[in-house]
Amino acid sequence: MPTRRISELPVPREESFRSPLHDPRTAVVLGRWLGLCVLLCFATGLVSHVLQNPPGWIRGLLPSRPVDGYRITQGLHVISGIAAVPLLGAKLWTVYPKLFAWPPVRGVRHALERLGIALLVAALLLELFTGLLNTLQWYPWPFPFRQTHFWLGWIATGGLLLHVAAKAPAIAANWRRVRPGLAERRAFLGGVAAAVGAVTLVTAGQSVPWLSRFDLLAPRRPDLGPQGLPVNRTAAQAGTVRVPPDWRLHVVGPRGYTLSLHELGQLPQYECELPIACVEGWSASARWTGVRVRDLLERVGAPESARVRVTSLEADGPYRVTEIEPAYSRDPLTLLALRVNGEVLAPDHGFPARIIAPNRPGVLQTKWVSRLEVLG
C-alpha cells in the first residue's frame, strides 16, 4: 500500500467538516444548557464562599435559616458542575471545526474574540477539572484549591458573559431557527441530555436523599462512616485520637468558667435534627444532642451582639479556630453537641464535643472543641 508523506496530506479547513451537527443552531442549544449550568454553579459557589469567608460588611447579615440552606446550595453547586462536564464536551465537539478556519485571524477584533474564547475554554476546563478532584479530596497541584477555584469561577463566568455579548446576533438568529439535519440534531441533543441525566442520577445521591439508592459514581455515600455519617478529617489526621482525661471546656467572657464533660452532661440537654453539609457536595442528616450555645453564652454574660471564637483541640489546620456570628450562636438549634444519633460522639465526629449549627458549612462545624471565647 503506497504511503504518503505528511506534507502531502490535505490540510483540513472549516468547510471540510460537513456534519449538520457542527452548525450554529446545535451550538446555540448546547450553549443554553451549558450557560445555565455555569451560572447556577457560579451563583451557588458564591454562596458557599460567603458562608465560609464572609466579608466584614456582611458578617452580621448571614442567616441561620433555612436549616437546609447550605445543603441545598452546595448540593446544587456540585450537581450543576458535574452536569456541565458532558455539556462542555458536546459544545466543544460541535464548534471545534472553527479551529480550522482560514485565515485564523481576520483582524484585531477577530483576534481578541478568539483570545477571549481560548481564555473561556481554558478557565472552564480547569474549573471543572479541579472541582471534580475536590469532590475526591485529591489535590495534586501546587496552588491552593479554594482561592484558585473562586477566581477561576469569576474568569469563566465573565468570559461566558462576554462571549454571549459578542455572539448575540448569531445567538438571536439561531435561537429558534430550524436548519437542515433536524433528525440528526434531535438524536445528538437527546444523547447529550441522556448523558447529563445519567451522570446526575448516579452522583446526586450524595446530597439528595431520595436519590441515594442510585449513588453509584459519587465519591461519598451519605450513610457510610462512623455512626452512619461520613467523615472528611479523622481524629488521627487531626491528632486528637487521645483526648486528655482532664479535658475541660473553657468558656471565656465577662463571667468566665470551665466545665468538665460530666458537668456539661448535667446541663439541660436539647436534641435537634440537622445536616452536615460539606463543600465536596455530600450531606447527611443526623440527630444531635447537647447543650445550646446560647445557654452557655448567657451563663458567661455575653451580650446579644457578641461573636464567639471556637477553638479546637487539633494542633493545626485551616479551621482549627472559627467564629460564630450572633445569628448562629443565638439560634436555639445551635448546639455544643455531645451525642449523635443517640450515641456518644465517636472520635472522628468530634469527641468530646463539637459545634452543630443550621445553614452552616461542614468545615465550620468545629470538632474537638476546647474553648469558646466571647468577642466584643
Image: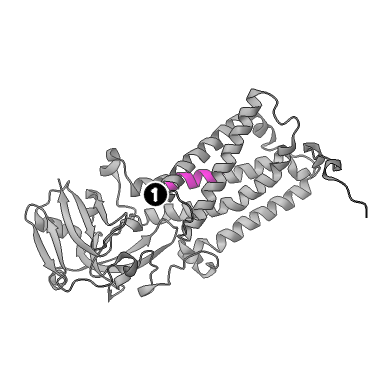
Instruction: Residue at 38%, 70% (x, y): give it.
Output: 229
* Residue 269 seen in the figure: yes
Pointer 1 local density, CA inside 10 Å: few below 14, some 14–19, many at least 20: many
Q: Disc 1 residue type? A: Ser
Where is residue 178 drawn, in percent x and y? 74, 39
Is 80 magenta? The answer is no
Residue 17 shown left or right of residue 334 in the figure? right
Instruction: Using the image as rendered, state which of residue 209 and residue 15 is in the foreground.
Output: 15
Q: Quadrant of residue 14?
A: top right
Where is residue 123 drawn, in percent x and y? 54, 42
Instruction: Residue at 60%, 58% (x, y): give it.
Output: 197
Is 37 magenta? The answer is yes
Instruction: Residue at 72%, 51% (x, y): give it.
Output: 188
Majority secondary structure of magenta residues: helix
Q: Quadrant of residue 165?
A: top right
In which quadrant is the N terminus drawn? Answer: bottom right
Where is residue 91 drawn, in percent x and y? 65, 45
Residue bounds of the magenta highlight = 36-45
Q: Is residue 349 above or below residue 375?
A: below
Q: Which residue is mark 1?
A: 48
Residue 360 shown left or right of residue 188 in the figure? left
Instruction: Using the image as rendered, state which of residue 91 and residue 196 is in the foreground.
Output: 91
Please give the count of numbered marks on the rendered protein: 1
Q: Quadrant of residue 255?
A: bottom left
* Residue 330 seen in the figure: no
Where is residue 13 drawn, in percent x and y? 79, 37
Q: Is residue 340 above or below residue 312?
A: below
Residue 74 shown left or right of residue 274 in the figure? right
In which quadrant is the C terminus drawn? Answer: top left
What secondary structure is found at the residue carrying circle 1?
helix
